[in-house]
């Protein structure tokens, strides 16, 4: 069975800084991959390479291959805008468009991609997927920044889901949230895996253990170990992985 995402010999640079070194891994469809490792190890750079956001940084470049359903995302014929519809991203801090309503935030990506349709129905569907509909259905014309931090993050997830992505990248989506909001995001991730493939960066190893099927440990730009989450946390093959997950460094 072909993996949903396949990364082959991925390297990334910020000018002279070699940030990722020969990373190769696969992600099966409808699973959650957690990316763990200490600060500065290349976690965020890795996920930004998966939908070509890395190349937007001045002086940044990458080599190697990233494939979704066997299609190389860096082939010349691939439109980066269309790619980012297929491979969506949710950032560390909620970033709703502050001058837009809740409703307009959700449809922003649809309009950008020229998608026409029944916007009210699409908004409801996306907000339901993001477990936010019941909380905001009577407030859709209010400003997005009137929501709490946790609600704003779920709104950003709804905005990403509205364009019907196949893969969702999440860069520490709960790091700025309180425990109750974090639990809602984790519950949402577990439900979304039924229809999506998810790659999540997290500093919280308990969170990785709770939400992911597999885990990849990065250190100093290298992929040290990748395997089933239970194995990574209970019986890692590499001593550096064991030292990290047991708190000896990080």
Image (cartoon, rainbow, N blue to C red):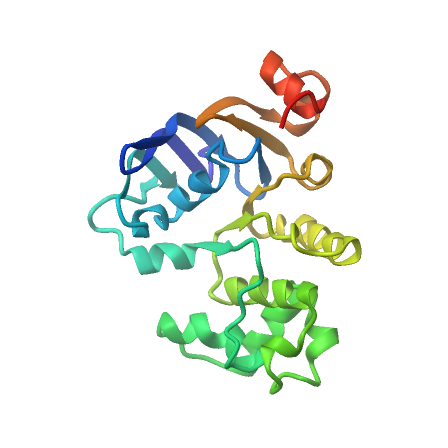
**Residue appearing at x 36%, y 70% in the figure:** 113
Left-right relation of 215 to 108:
right
* Residue 56 image position (x, y, % from top left): 31, 52
Q: Residue furthest left?
A: 76
Q: Is residue 65 above or below residue 115?
A: above
* Percent x, y of residue 147: 67, 74
- Which residue is pictured at 53% across the width and 55% down the height? 91
- Residue that protrudes farthest toward the right in the picture: 180
Where does the C terminus fall, quadrant-wise? Answer: top right
Where on the picture, by quarter, is residue 236?
Answer: top right
* Residue 161 x/y as whole percent: 53, 62
For image coordinates 61% across by 20% down, the residue present is: 241
Q: Is residue 244 left or right of residue 110?
A: right
| In this view, 222 is above or below 169 | above
Residue at the image point whose x is 75% and y is 56% from the top: 178
- Residue 130: image x %, image y %? 64, 63
């Amino acid at each position: 069975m072909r993996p949903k995402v396949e990364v082959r010999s991925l390297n990334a640079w910020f000018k002279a800084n070699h940030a990722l070194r020969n990373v190769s891994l696969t992600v099966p469809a409808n699973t959650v991959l957690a990316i763990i490792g200490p600060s500065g190890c290349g976690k965020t750079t890795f996920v930004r390479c998966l939908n070509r956001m890395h190349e937007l940084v001045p002086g940044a470049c990458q080599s190697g291959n990233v494939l979704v359903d066997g299609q190389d995302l860096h082939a010349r014929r691939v439109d980066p805008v269309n790619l980012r519809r297929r491979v969506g991203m949710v950032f560390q801090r909620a970033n709703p468009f502050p001058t837009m309503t809740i409703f307009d935030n959700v449809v922003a990506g649809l309009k950008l991609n020229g998608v026409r349709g029944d916007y009210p129905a699409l908004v409801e569907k996306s907000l339901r997927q993001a477990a936010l509909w019941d909380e905001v259905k009577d407030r859709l014309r209010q400003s997005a920044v009137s929501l709490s931090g946790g609600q704003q993050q779920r709104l950003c997830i709804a905005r990403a889901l509205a364009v019907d992505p196949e893969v969702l990248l999440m860069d520490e989506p709960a790091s700025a949230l309180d425990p109750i909001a974090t639990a809602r995001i984790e519950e949402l991730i577990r439900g979304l895996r039924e229809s999506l493939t998810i790659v999540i960066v997290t500093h919280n190893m308990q969170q990785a253990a709770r939400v992911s099927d597999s885990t990849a440990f990065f250190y100093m730009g290298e992929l040290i170990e990748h395997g089933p989450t239970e194995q990574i946390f209970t019986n890692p093959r590499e001593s550096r992985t064991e030292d990290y997950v047991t708190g000896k460094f990080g």
